[in-house]
Amino acid sequence: MRRKIVFSSVACLLLISLMLAACAPKEEAQTIKIGVIGPMTYMEGEHHWWGAEIGRDTVNDAGGVTIGEEQYLIELVKADSNEMLSPTDAASAMERLITVDQVDFVVGGFRTEGVFPMQEVAMDHQMIFLGCGAATVGLCQVVADDYDRYKYFFRVTPMCSTFLVYNTLMEVGMAGGIMKAQTGIQRPLKVAICAEGAEWADGMVAAMKGLVPAKLGMEVVGVWRPSPTATELTAEMTAIEDSGADIILTIISGPLGIPYAKSWGELEVPAASVGINVEAQKEGFWEATGGFGNYETTLATYAEGVAQTHKTLAFLEAFKAKSGQMPTYTAGTNDAIIFLSEAIERAGTLDSDAVVVELEKTDFIGTGGPIAFTGLEDAPLGNPHDLVYGPGYATGIAIQWQGEAQKCIWPNLSPGDWAPSDDWLDIFFEGTVTWQAPPRVIEKLKAEAAEE
């Protein structure tokens, strides 16, 4: 009888202890807070956010980030920078992320005029800021000028503006070679430069005015700088057609890209459009231009069905499942969050100085190509912490709208095409097709060639 009472008492105590354990508040998982900052009411900011969400899920689904014996999960904090309209708002948004939301790291940024002030705020707080949008080379040159202050900034995407110039020259040169071969035209092709009136484009315009004649043997017939928020470009397109341009070299990153392409197609300007038009990277470009964007050609990071690395296609599938869209280059926040997590693990701490040391060692296969950063001693443009560029590293691609489909059309160089080095001739991704000139351009040049 006594044994039964003791057994019952032990059983009751065990049951009570289990009930208390079940009712006790569970300890919340530790988190690493990453701010995602960008123009969230625009496509570029939306893709910042969606890319970051996929990166977060990739890390968390694999168990999170291990620091010593502790496990951390990634938590994202969204910040609308309003940088398209106000650099002051951009700086304030960064300040709130750091001081109010108390994030541990920041990714994003798009418009140069906004990223410079955001960079200053982040550096004031020794906050690691992984840039995923602004190309201006000066954002990384300041790292060389004052390493102790600016070492917390790294550019993840795109490659810097100087190298975007190189890619655009290769893209335009390839297109020009195809146009001359198909029409028999002998004179130098004429190029009109159409660049949005934004700071990041200033240096590129200046470079193109000299390099297009020097490297491609083409004639620059004029430069047009419409407002980044212009809604129609009839005057510019009329002037470009009057200039006799055969190619319009575009340098456009923002919403201007839609009215630009629509005006170009509606007015049937007899000049091919080749360069940078970020809006043409998105899947909704065809509908947004009413089909008038057919044959538009732009540098890009991703193309449907084209794998630059073994990670590309899975990322495209995940992004389309989340958003219903193809990712633009600002979705590089995905890669940023994943390799940042790896750097934190190697550092074994959230301390910014220690994580910077590990970020400088980054050797990561990203969704758009291998990712590594230039160092203090080997930065080719005096731009430490910038994306390493060229064959074997980040090369980028170019796409063209052919009918209702995006097609990868570059790298696809032939002997005789201009390139910074011969090894560019060996780069080709499966699924790449031949670039097409608009029929109206071919007709114009053939008619002229017949008269030569």
Image (tube, rainbow, N blue to C red):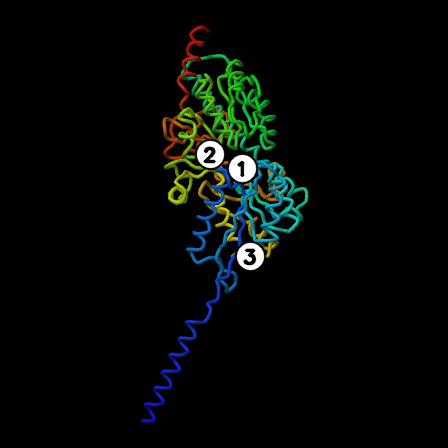
Whole-number angstrom distance, CA of label 1 to CA of label 2: 11 Å
For marks 1 and 3 on the same chain, the one whose residue lies earlier in the sequence: 1
Going by the numbered disc 2, the residue's amino acid type is Ala
- In the displayed structure, 220 sits above or below 427; it is above
Element carrying mark 3: helix
The part of the image, by quadrant, that contains residue 438 is: top left
Give the side of residue 352 with respect to residue 438, left or right: right
Q: Nearer the viewer, residue 354 or 298?
A: 298
* Left or right for 302, reference 113: left
Look at label 3 and name its amino acid: Ala
Checking the image for residue 347, the label placed there is 3
Residue 142 to residue 35: above or below: above
Mark 3 Cα-neighbour bin, 10 Å: few <14, some 14–19, many ≥20: many
Residue 159: mark: 1
Q: Nearer the viewer, residue 111 or 72?
A: 111
Query: In the visual, does 30 lie left or right of 431?
Result: right
Q: Amino acid at mark 1?
A: Met
Q: Residue furthest top?
A: 451
Q: In the structure shown, which secondary structural element does the residue marked by tag 1 occupy?
A: loop
Question: Residue shown at 38%/85% (left/top)?
Answer: 10
State the mark number for residue 300.
2
Say which of 31 and 397 sits in front.
Answer: 31
Q: Residue at x 38, y 29 (%)?
A: 433
